[in-house]
């Protein structure tokens, strides 16, 4: 068996280098059958880096991943085991410093004949971990998939215990109350500029010369080393949100290593939009989704008494904003915390009822639900700070950003004039990229041509705010042979394995049998959430399961 494995490693080594060299870029085919264009893509992806991936993957395939009981810090049950895979910090220097990525796995529950390999998942961010993903094996929606696949999660570089990145003291995330004006004054803007400059310096000071290596191309390369470590000749992968972006980079760099890929809630991969313009588009989409929430609340005015139209609900919301600006709720919830907790209603409509309840109760004189939902949570501070650091480093490293404040001010002022809900909050989160000390990359042009990839599956909700639907259309155009499944008139971010049986059927057909429609299909929206009673036991419901959210992909 050792000799066979070694032979397979050598084969994988050769095919990995070849796949990096034969990828065809956006320029299209040339007179020599695309070879010249292919070499251009390898150069942009990095010929030295391609060699580094090949070497790292060969080493990982030979070593494998030793799965054992998970550390207690992961808080995972005994049914899930954990291991590590070593990857180069810099793929151009594969013999240099390495970092360890943590990996989790739940073995396929079916027979050996039913097993199809490993299904690797990334939930997005940048800055999110999927170490929890093997727990999906116990959910009814994933039962059949979990029979066929080992369910594998991991923490990408910089996240969790995978060479963790930090840019500031986690206690800074607990500052409260804070204010977050939708139309900031010049004095407030100067304060936020100073904070952004300080944050960028903190990232550089803490990361040192490792800072440039936290980027999407390296995330894609890491994924191929993980594939090899798992013993998979070809990768079965599902990426959600930002996970779709570096998943698409993977498909472009390593098309011969793709078995099946699911892109759930796709980021627009157009290099001209990564990442500055994508964030502007995101803020515009959140305004539309915020209106969807207010329209639903108005429909259930008998439960919430916040108004019978979206406009009336907005006025009620402004009353809450004015109230916590004058006197922060519980001494902890100002307009900044209010904005943060209401943002989750733009991501997931299963938050609509609890958020509407908090607004309603506050205006009735009971601030406790809002305090419970919006107050900073000390136990979440380290993970939150780590996630923000990785998010910032990856997006700032990935692409050029405007470096003049006047450009940010002009674009966000114009957008906030008609989309005030999330525009400036999103701008402040990304502003460190204007002062970023590390070199910026130029995004790789995601594109494949007929015959390079097996069919891939794209899932998208038509009214998704975090990854607007236009991104799914763009990815569909760029990945030859891809299939787009659209959930019409819905806006939940991340729709695989959730409330829509139609979407789940397409997902299972694809992952279990490799079956998919010719090019596109549609699903009706999942059912709208039901309003809840305003009895005290409901209005004082516990903290949301998904935790605090920032505007990420």
Image (cartoon, grey):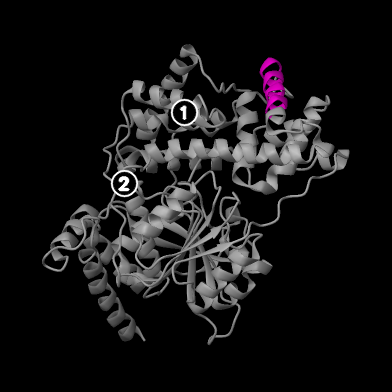
Any magenta on residue 320?
yes
Q: Is residue 272 left or right of residue 47?
A: right
Residue highlighted by disc 2: 271
Q: Nearer the viewer, residue 263 or 68?
A: 263
Residue furthest to the top in view is 187
Q: Is residue 284 left or right of residue 24?
A: right
Element type at marker 1?
helix
Q: Is residue 356 above or below residue 21?
A: above
- The residue at the point 54 percent across, 51 percent down is 462
**Which range of residues does the magenta coloring cover?**
314-327
Q: Of callouts 2 and 1, which one flags the residue occurring earlier in the amino acid sequence?
A: 2
Question: How far across and how far down the image is residue 191, in percent?
Answer: 46, 17
Residue furthest to the front in view is 309
Question: How far across and how far down the image is residue 81, in percent?
Answer: 56, 67
Q: Is residue 53 left or right of residue 63?
A: left
Question: How far across and how far down the image is residue 226, in percent?
Answer: 40, 64
Give the spatial CA distance, label 2 vs label 1. Answer: 21 Å
Q: Is residue 449 left or right of residue 459?
A: left
Quarter of the image where one finds residue 25: bottom left
């Amino acid at each position: 068996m050792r000799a066979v494995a070694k032979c397979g490693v050598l084969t994988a080594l050769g095919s990995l280098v070849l796949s990096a060299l034969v990828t065809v870029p956006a320029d299209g085919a040339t007179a020599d059958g695309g070879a010249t264009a292919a070499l251009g893509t390898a150069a942009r992806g990095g010929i030295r880096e391609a060699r580094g991936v090949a070497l790292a993957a060969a080493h990982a395939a030979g070593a494998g991943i030793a799965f054992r009981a998970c550390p207690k810090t992961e808080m995972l049950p005994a049914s899930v085991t954990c291991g590590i895979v070593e990857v180069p910090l810099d793929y151009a220097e594969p013999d240099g410093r390495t970092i360890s990525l943590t990996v989790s796995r739940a073995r396929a529950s079916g027979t050996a004949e039913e097993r199809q390999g490993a299904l690797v998942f990334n939930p997005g961010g940048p800055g999110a971990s999927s170490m929890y993903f093997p727990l999906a094996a116990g959910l009814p929606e994933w039962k059949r998939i979990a029979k066929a696949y080992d369910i594998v999660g991991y923490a990408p570089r910089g996240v969790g215990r995978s060479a963790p990145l930090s840019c500031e003291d986690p206690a800074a995330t607990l500052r409260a109350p804070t204010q977050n004006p939708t139309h900031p004054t010049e004095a407030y803007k100067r304060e936020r500029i100073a904070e952004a400059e300080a944050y960028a310096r903190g990232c550089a000071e803490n990361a040192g010369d490792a800072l440039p290596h936290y980027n999407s191309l390296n995330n894609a390369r890491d994924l191929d080393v993980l594939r090899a470590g798992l013993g998979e000749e070809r990768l079965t992968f599902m990426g959600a949100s930002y996970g779709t972006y570096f998943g698409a980079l993977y498909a472009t760099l390593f098309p011969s290593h793709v078995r099946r890929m699911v892109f759930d809630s796709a980021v627009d991969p157009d290099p001209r939009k990564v990442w500055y313009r994508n964030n502007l588009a995101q803020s515009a989409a959140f305004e539309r989704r915020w209106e969807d929430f207010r329209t639903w609340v108005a429909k259930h005015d008998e439960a919430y008494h916040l108004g019978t139209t979206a406009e009336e609900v907005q006025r009620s919301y402004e009353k809450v904003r004015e109230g916590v600006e004058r006197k922060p709720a519980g001494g902890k919830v100002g307009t900044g915390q209010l904005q943060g907790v209401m943002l989750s209603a733009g991501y997931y409509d299963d938050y609509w009822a609890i958020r509407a309840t908090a607004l309603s109760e506050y205006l009735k004189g009971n601030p406790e639900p809002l305090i419970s939902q919006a107050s900073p949570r000390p136990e979440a501070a380290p993970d939150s700070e780590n996630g923000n650091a990785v998010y910032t480093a990856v997006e700032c490293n990935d692409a050029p950003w405007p470096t003049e404040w006047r450009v940010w001010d002009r674009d966000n002022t114009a957008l906030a004039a008609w989309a005030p809900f999330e525009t400036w909050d999103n701008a402040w989160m990304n502003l460190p990229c204007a002062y970023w000390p590390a070199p910026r990359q130029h995004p790789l042009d995601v594109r494949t041509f007929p015959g390079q990839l097996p069919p891939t599956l794209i899932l998208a909700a038509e009214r998704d705010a975090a990854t607007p639907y236009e991104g799914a259309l763009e990815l569909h155009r760029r990945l030859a042979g891809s299939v787009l499944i659209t959930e019409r008139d819905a806006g939940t971010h991340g729709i695989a394995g959730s409330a829509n049986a139609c979407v789940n059927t397409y997902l299972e057909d694809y992952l279990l049998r490799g079956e998919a429609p010719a090019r596109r299909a549609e699903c009706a929206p999942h059912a709208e959430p039901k309003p809840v009673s305003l009895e005290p036991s409901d209005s004082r419901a516990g903290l949301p399961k998904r935790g605090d959210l920032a505007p990420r992909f």
